[in-house]
Image: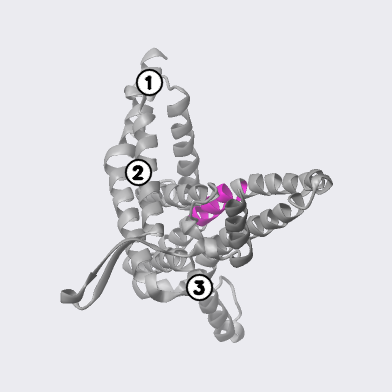
Amino acid sequence: MNTLFNTVNFWRYNSSPLTQFEIKDLISIDTPILGNLHISITNIGFYLTMGAFFLLIINLLSTNYNKLIGNSWSISQESLYATLHSIVVNQINPKNGQIYFPFIYALFIFILINNLIGMVPYSFASTSHFVLTFALSFTIVLGATILGFQKHGLEFFSLLVPAGCPLGLLPLLVLIEFISYLARNISLGLRLAANILSGHMLLHILAGFTYNIMTSGIIFFFLGLIPLAFIIAFSGLELGIAFIQAQVFVVLTSGYIKDALDLH
Amino acid sequence: MPQLVPFYFVNEITFTFIILAITVYILSKYILPRFVRLFLSRTFISKLLG
């Protein structure tokens, strides 16, 4: 028992709220013959793969043998489909936007599942990593830009000119629009990672605080139930944020694709 | 901040893009068309009855 308390105290005093985001090797190979490559399966890779398997298993379980009348499993999947379909139809284009639907759907599920996996205690929040979210956001904005150039050629630059702006203000406005176009790269990825990161850090700090209170004595144990209620409430809030951030990411992605397809 | 340690950046990005690409492929080839077929058959049956 004493050893257990020592271990817990060691963990408590030696861990910052950020240690939960550390990437560790699970299996790794050093290859001196291939230019000293360090090939490894890390915890983030493991959890991302688990998320993909989870998606596959959920979809296999909810096939309902292609029956016309759905059961509760298949209705959950159908409503997810309908929600994302309405996002794509409303945000991009009812007619031409549908070819982007599989991408938007996959992106939503990918972000949502990884956000939710992060909510499981002692697991790993992959979407709190800026590299991952920035890689996604930079790729999406670059892809949308390429799409715009492919469709409109050099006319794509008219995106930077707001409709009906006076000629004198044009250089300034084009500069501002260009900066705001570049800022999309950063803002899209930063929003997701910062939300998930801050939520997990907040829960970690509150949990450490509550643990300290509740182990201080019998009265403090009952007093600690108040911050414990806050932790539970924040966990609910984080679950909501997991859904909302996935939705916001997807809605903004659709908006950027729409900007590239139909210049305003 | 462990997120900013660059040692595993390539590993993260490789996993992300491979998994996202596989997800897009499996969804668009196997999973999503099933929904379309289901909705279409519902539409046809309701037209048939109506």
Q: Residues within 10 Å of mark 1 (few under 14, many from 20)?
A: few
**Residue tagged by mark 2?**
A53
Q: Residue at x 53, y 73 (%)?
A: A183
Please determine whether, in this image, residue A61 is positioned above or below residue A6. above
Residue at the extreme front of the image, as rendered = A2
**Residue tagged by mark 1?**
A68
Position in image of residue A238 (x %, y %): 62, 50
Q: Nearer the viewer, residue A185 or A233?
A: A233
Quick one: label 1 or label 2, which is nearer the N terminus?
Answer: 2
Q: Is residue A258 visible?
A: yes
In the image, which residues are magenta?
A: A240-251
Q: Nearer the viewer, mark 1 or mark 3?
A: 1
User: Are dots 1 and 2 on a single chain?
Assistant: yes
Q: CA distance from mark 1 to mark 2?
A: 26 Å
Element marked by disc 2 = helix
Quick one: label 3 or label 2, which is nearer the N terminus?
Answer: 2
Amino acid beneath label 2: Phe
Please determine whether, in this image, residue A51 is positioned above or below residue A128. above
The label number, if any, that marks residue A181 in the structure image: 3
Element marked by disc 3 = helix
The color scheme shown is one colour
Position in image of residue B7 (x %, y %): 39, 74
Q: Chain of mark 1?
A: A
Quick one: label 1 or label 3, which is nearer the N terminus?
Answer: 1
Residue at the extreme top of the image, as rendered = B49
Q: Residue at x 62, y 53 (%)?
A: A5
